[in-house]
């Protein structure tokens, strides 16, 4: 059997092999994170976990502002559109992003204390934050072309190697830097990335020429600048609950909420893995107007994603206990709601792909702003009374609004039904029913949950294998 699988793999095309490796990389990365988080969450107090997650929220905001997110969105599109000039695309966008990042870093250094005080973070955290942002930016500029061109072995080595080292160092530094365990955790992430960034810069300088570094500046800025408010609104939607919990409640509750959110985010294992291989294919299908194939594959991957969400919901009591411990189980009822919210945060991308491939991105920001405004308004009203329970539900509502708006706008652009919404709605109803059932089963006999996990697990494996076969057949 093993020989048969290996032979099938050897005879497969590069797209199929790349899909397997992209999934494997995502799963291994997430597995390492799951293994290390219980150690870190037990080393840090609930308050320290809360401070770390506030730091993560602000690093997400600053990442967009000081890099303009030039390593995502527009970078993928330009690499796909200019397959014969990818070296120039890489060097042009990297130089532009580096200049902008350096300028912002100088500005923040000049006003380091006021900015740190305003954000509620130590000045040293801000410095480490900028080092992390720059290092991650460099890494993305180097590895995204590897993914686009299906150089999966190199991609896997860099991503998994970096994540393994970061995870181990994070635990060690958080434990040994007793005077500031939060600093130890963030240094564990930043130092390996900085070393890797230096290596990638050397490789890019050696491989690329300095000619035409400004070639794609105008095009990339024209594409991405209108999206910056969208990216920021997306972060606000995903993270405002933590910041508002900090100010309207306490860092203790931020810590509780963050751990159950971290468990819920494991659903991104499948979402990210599928999206890495689905998006380039979806761009081609939309460009060629191959809607029947697009409908069939979209239905399949959404169903696979929902099955994984349902398994995760049912496994929540054990998962949250492993990640954080008994003190975090009080927030168990919001886990299914958070998983649904994270599902919709990825779900709407199947519709926004239409906007990106047709370069109709002006409406993206207003849609995201609407979802964020609803989320913040509801948080402001409900968090003081209901705490992190309100934060989970308001996040879900925000993402549902965004998904619905993107669907109707994609239909407006295409003037056609590119997606099978009847089937997709049935799948979403299954997710809703599973959410209610999971909350009820948390207080029921445990074997009932495990029976359902087994059923959904078998279906997931069967359909996930079908997804991979479909990719191979149509690539």
Image (spheres, grey):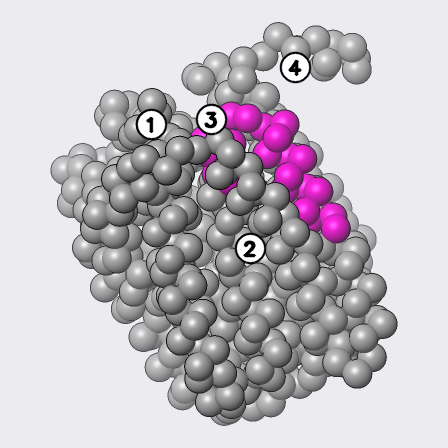
Residue at image mark 1: 85
Tell me: 26 left or right of 406.
Answer: right
Binning the other alpha carbons within 10 Å of mark 3 as few (below 14), some (14 to 19) or many (20 upward) gives: some
Sequence-first tag of 4 and 1: 4
Q: CA distance from mark 3 to mark 1?
A: 13 Å
Residue in the picture at 58% in, 12% down: 12
Q: Position of residue 162 (x, y in %)?
A: 68, 47
Which of labels 3 and 1 is toward the front?
1
Q: Which residues are magenta?
A: 142-165
Which of the 4 quarters of the picture holds residue 338?
Answer: bottom right
Would residue 121 be visible to someone looking at this image?
Answer: yes
Residue at image mark 3: 149
Tell me: 431 left or right of 20.
Answer: left
Residue at image mark 4: 9
438 vs 207, nearest the viewer: 207
9 vs 118, nearest the viewer: 118
Q: Which mark is residue 135?
A: 2
Binning the other alpha carbons within 10 Å of mark 1 as few (below 14), some (14 to 19) or many (20 upward) gives: few
**Residue 163 lies in the magenta stretch:** yes
Binning the other alpha carbons within 10 Å of mark 2 as few (below 14), some (14 to 19) or many (20 upward) gives: many
Q: Is residue 55 above or below residue 361?
A: below
Q: CA distance from mark 4 to mark 1?
A: 31 Å
Tell me: 246 left or right of 188.
Answer: left
Q: Position of residue 56 (x, y in %)?
A: 56, 69
């Amino acid at each position: 059997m093993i020989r048969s699988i290996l032979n099938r793999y050897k005879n497969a095309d590069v797209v199929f092999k790349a899909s397997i490796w992209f999934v494997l990389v995502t799963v291994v990365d997430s597995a390492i994170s799951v293994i290390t988080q219980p150690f870190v969450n037990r080393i840090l107090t609930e308050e320290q976990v809360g401070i770390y997650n506030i730091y993560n929220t602000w690093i997400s905001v600053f990442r967009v502002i000081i890099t303009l997110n030039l390593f995502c969105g527009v970078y993928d599109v330009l690499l796909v559109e200019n397959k014969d000039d990818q070296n120039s695309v890489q060097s042009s966008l990297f130089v532009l992003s580096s200049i902008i990042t350096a300028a912002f870093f100088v500005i923040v250094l000049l006003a380091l204390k006021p900015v740190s005080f305003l954000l509620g973070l130590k000045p040293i955290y801000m410095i480490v934050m900028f080092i992390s942002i720059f290092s991650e930016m460099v890494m993305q500029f180097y590895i995204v072309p590897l993914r686009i061109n299906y150089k999966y072995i190199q991609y896997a080595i860099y991503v998994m190697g970096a994540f393994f080292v970061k995870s181990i160092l994070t635990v060690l530094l958080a434990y040994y830097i007793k005077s500031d365990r939060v600093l130890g955790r963030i240094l564990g992430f930043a130092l390996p990335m900085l070393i890797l960034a230096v290596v990638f810069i050397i490789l890019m300088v050696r491989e690329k020429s300095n000619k035409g570094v400004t070639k794609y500046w105008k095009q990339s800025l024209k594409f991405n600048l209108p999206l910056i408010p969208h990216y920021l609104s997306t972060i606000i939607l995903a993270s405002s609950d933590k910041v508002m919990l900090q100010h309207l409640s306490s860092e203790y509750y931020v810590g509780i909420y963050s751990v159950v959110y971290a468990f819920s985010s494991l659903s991104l294992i499948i979402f990210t893995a599928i999206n890495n291989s689905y998006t380039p294919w979806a761009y081609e299908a939309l460009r060629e107007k191959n809607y029947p194939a697009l409908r069939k594959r979209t239905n399949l991957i959404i169903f696979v994603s929902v099955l994984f969400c349902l398994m995760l919901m049912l496994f929540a009591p054990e998962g949250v206990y492993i990640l954080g411990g008994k003190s975090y189980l009080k927030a168990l009822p919001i886990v299914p709601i958070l998983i649904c919210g994270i599902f919709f945060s990825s779900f709407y991308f199947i519709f926004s792909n239409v906007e990106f491939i047709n370069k109709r991105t002006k409406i993206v920001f207003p849609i995201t702003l609407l979802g964020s405004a609803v989320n913040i308004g509801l948080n402001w009203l409900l968090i003081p009374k209901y705490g992190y329970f309100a934060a989970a539900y308001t996040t879900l509502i925000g993402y549902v609004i965004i998904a619905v708006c993107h669907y109707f706008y994609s239909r407006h652009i295409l003037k056609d039904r590119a997606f099978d919404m009847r089937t997709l709605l049935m799948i979403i109803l299954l997710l809703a029913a599973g959410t209610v059932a999971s909350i009820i089963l948390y207080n029921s006999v445990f074997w009932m949950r495990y029976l359902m996990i087994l059923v959904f697990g078998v279906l997931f494996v069967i359909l996930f294998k079908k997804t991979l076969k479909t990719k191979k057949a149509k690539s």
